[in-house]
């Protein structure tokens, strides 16, 4: 079986890109012919490792204009002649669906990650039309994501299958070997410092500005507290300015992009995810694997994961002080924080093993109408 996976960028190191990379390697080991195509002209950090495994990596060398890539993408698809085309993220779900239909790819599938809750009405309308006219099926990363696309874009519910993200449980052995004290010393942190942290690209939807505001209120009560922002992106300068305006620049650490996120999770005492929306947060799974108490925004893709009061705590996006109070309470009641962390680790082990994710994809793709697609509505 030959599969062609199409995504906007192979370079950002985001959650979708990492899942695509791991899935490509998994399918190749299962004997599939795998092609991975990025719209932008960026060499991914994992291109060499994919090529070494026999995966063909293609770059369309776009200038960020998805419509101009359509003729090139159609040409590539006609040359490759895949059995299945799996398109990831906007705008590739739209342009990939159109190109795949023009190139007569037997089976088209979209991979739905975090829904953009601020998507303009025209994009919502176009997305829904392409979904109904071009695609044979859709994979949603969580039930909440499926519900949004079915309700808003009018995706046919019977064609949307939920496959959650998974975590490599073998990582727990690596986590135990990481010296917490050594990593802290590298960042000039002592045992007295209470470290609140988050992982994620510095983009508006990740909402790190709310965390900065909550931390400013927290720092007045806990001068030894520190905030760790692991990631990079176009919002970095704005966030640095906000930290300066709040008077907490000396207490906030911007690490930039890091490949080994577990080392930075080991620095933390509490993990916070303030995103406006998520697909199915891999960083929460990682934090749970590190046995950290997790606090998340009560939004799509986060409330799917966290059972409030059992394996984490949820907060409203409306009030930064509410988040600060939740963190203070966790610090005041360490036994409760440890109970949440232990329950989170159990949640990962029982429900979100990476093997389960791979099995879900493999079963879905094997059952796809690659050879005899059904009539489309």
Image (cartoon, rainbow, N blue to C red):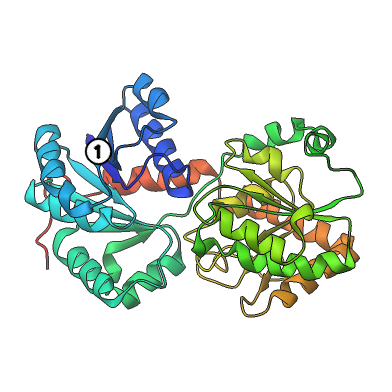
User: Picture quarter containing residue 26?
Assistant: top left
What number of labels is visible?
Answer: 1
**Can residue 306 be seen at all in this image of the molecule?**
no
In this image, 220 relative to 303: left or right? right
Up-down relation of residue 327 to residue 166 (above or below): below
In this image, 179 relative to 300: left or right? right
Q: Position of residue 333 (x, y in %)?
A: 89, 65
The residue sitting at 22% across, 64% down in the picture is 131
Q: Is disc 1 placed on a helix, strand or loop?
A: strand
In this image, 27 relative to 144: left or right? left
Of the pair 256 and 169, the residue shown nearer to us = 256
Q: Quadrant of the N terminus?
A: top left
Up-down relation of residue 293 to residue 16 (above or below): below
The residue sitting at 59% across, 38% down in the picture is 258
Q: Position of residue 50 (x, y in %)?
A: 38, 27
Q: Which residue is mark 1?
A: 61
Q: Quadrant of the C terminus?
A: bottom left
Query: Residue at the bottom extreme?
Result: 318
- How packed mark 1 is, by other alpha carbons closer than 10 Å (few <14, some 14-19, many 20 or more), is few
Q: Position of residue 71 (x, y in %)?
A: 10, 45
The residue sitting at 17% across, 54% down in the picture is 67
Q: Position of residue 56 (x, y in %)?
A: 27, 27
User: Picture quarter containing residue 161?
Assistant: bottom left
**Can residue 69 be seen at all in this image of the molecule?**
yes
In this image, 245 relative to 194: left or right? left
User: Picture quarter containing residue 17?
Assistant: top left
């Amino acid at each position: 079986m030959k599969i062609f996976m199409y995504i906007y960028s192979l370079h950002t190191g985001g959650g979708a890109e990492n899942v695509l990379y791991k899935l490509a390697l998994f399918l190749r080991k299962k004997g599939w012919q795998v092609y991975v195509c990025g719209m932008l002209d960026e060499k991914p950090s994992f291109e060499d490792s994919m090529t070494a495994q026999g995966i063909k990596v293609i770059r369309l060398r776009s200038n960020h204009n998805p419509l101009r890539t359509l003729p090139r993408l159609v040409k590539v698809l006609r040359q490759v002649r895949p059995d299945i085309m799996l398109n990831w993220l906007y705008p590739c779900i739209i342009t990939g669906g159109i190109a795949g239909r023009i190139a007569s790819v037997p089976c088209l599938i979209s991979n739905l990650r975090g829904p953009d809750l601020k998507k303009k009405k025209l994009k919502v309308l176009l997305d829904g039309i392409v979904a109904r006219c071009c695609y044979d099926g859709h994979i949603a990363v969580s039930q909440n994501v499926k519900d949004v696309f079915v309700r808003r874009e009018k995706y046919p519910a019977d064609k949307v299958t939920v496959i959650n993200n998974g975590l490599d449980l073998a990582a727990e052995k690596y986590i135990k070997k990481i010296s917490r004290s050594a990593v802290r010393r590298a960042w000039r942190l002592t045992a007295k410092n209470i470290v609140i942290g988050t992982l994620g690209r510095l983009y508006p939807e990740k909402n790190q500005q709310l965390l900065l505001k909550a931390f400013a209120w927290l720092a007045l009560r806990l001068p030894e507290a520190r905030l760790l922002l692991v990631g990079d992106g176009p919002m970095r300068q704005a966030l640095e300015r906000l930290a300066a305006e709040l008077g907490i620049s000396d207490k906030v650490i911007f690490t930039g992009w890091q490949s080994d996120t577990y080392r930075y999770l080991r620095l933390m005492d509490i993990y916070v995810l303030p995103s406006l929306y998520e697909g199915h947060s891999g960083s929460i799974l990682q934090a749970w694997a590190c046995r950290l108490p997790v606090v998340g925004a009560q939004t799509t893709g986060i409330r799917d994961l966290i059972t409030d009061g059992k394996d984490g705590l949820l907060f409203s996006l409306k009030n930064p002080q509410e988040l600060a109070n939740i963190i203070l309470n966790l610090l005041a009641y360490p036994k409760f924080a440890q109970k949440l962390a232990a329950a989170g680790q159990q949640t990962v082990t029982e429900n979100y093993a990476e093997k389960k994710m791979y099995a879900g994809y493999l079963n879905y793709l094997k059952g796809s109408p690659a050879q005899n697609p059904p009539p489309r509505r």
